[in-house]
Amino acid sequence: MLIASLLLSFATVAPMTSGCGDVGTWTTTCQVSNDGHSVQIGGEGSGHGRASATGGSSREPVAPSPEPRDCGPLNRCEDFTVSLLPQATIADVASFAPSPTNIVSEPAGLGVVGLPTNFVVRAAEHTATGTLFDLPVTVRFTPQEVTIAPGDGSTISSGLGGRSWGDLGAPQFTPTDTSHSYTERGTYSASAVIHYRAEVDFGRGWRPVPGTLDIATGPHLVRVLEARSTLVERTCDEGPRGPGC
C-alpha cells in the first residue's frame, strides 16, 4: 500500500510584545520600539536592567524579525495534511467484480442450418463496497461491450448483449444484432465475454479505472439441425405415410 501525503506547514508568527517588565522597572512611562536592527527603550523614573533610570535610552542590536506569513484576515496559521488518493488498477478491483452471467440462444438451444440463431447475454451494472488500500471504497462496473462466440470460429460484438425475439416483438428466425446462421449441422459450444468498465469512489466522487475487466460466461450448447422440404401432394394429416410425415 502506498499512500502519498503532502504536509504543508505554516509557521505561526506571534506579534512582538512591547512590555517593559523584562528590561527595567519604571515609575511612570515606558516606551519600546524595534526597527529590526535595534531596540529603543525610554521612559522617566527609576529602573534597572538594560535601560537608564534617568529617562535616557539604550540601544542594543537584535536579529531581524522573521518575515510574517500570510495567515489570512484572522491571523490564524494552522498545520494540515493533504492526502493524495492512490490510483486503482483493474487488478486491484477484480475482487469486486460481478459474478459470471449466462448466454442463451433461441429457439431453446436449437438452430437450423441457414437460419438465424439468436443469442442473448444479460449484462447489467454492478456495484460493490469494501476496503481497498485500507480505505473504504465503492466500486462500480458498467458493461461496455459483449463479444459472442457461436462456437464455429466466428464472433459477434454487441454493446447491449442482445435481446430476445419476444422483447423485440419479432417472429422466430428474424435476424438481430446478436444472431448467427450456422452453415453445417452439429452441436456447437457457444460462449461470450463481457467487457466491463470500472470506477472507484473513496468518498470523494467517482474516479475511472484504466482498462476493462473481461468476464466470460459459461459454455452453452447449441444443437443445429438441417431442415429439408419436400413437395408433396397431400399434407401429413391427409397422408400420414407421405414423405416427411
Image: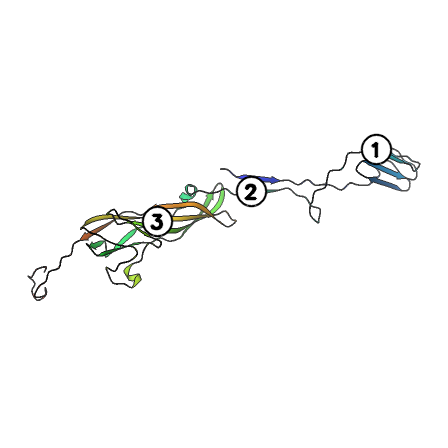
Q: Quadrant of residue 44?
A: top right
- At mark 1, the secondary structure is strand
Mark on residue 194? 3
Mark 1 crowd level (few <14, some 14–19, many ≥20, 10 Å Cα): few
- At mark 2, the secondary structure is strand
Q: Position of residue 79 (x, y in %)?
A: 64, 42
Q: Is residue 121 left or right of residue 4?
A: left
Mark 1 and mark 3 lie on one chain; the one further toward the N terminus is 1
Mark 2 crowd level (few <14, some 14–19, many ≥20, 10 Å Cα): few
Tell me the CA gap for discs 2 and 1.
Answer: 47 Å
Mark nearer the viewer, 2 or 1: 1
Q: Is residue 81 left or right of residue 225?
A: right
Residue at 54% across, 39% down: 4
Residue at 58% across, 40% down: 6
Mark on residue 83? 2
Mark 2 and mark 1 lie on one chain; the one further toward the N terminus is 1
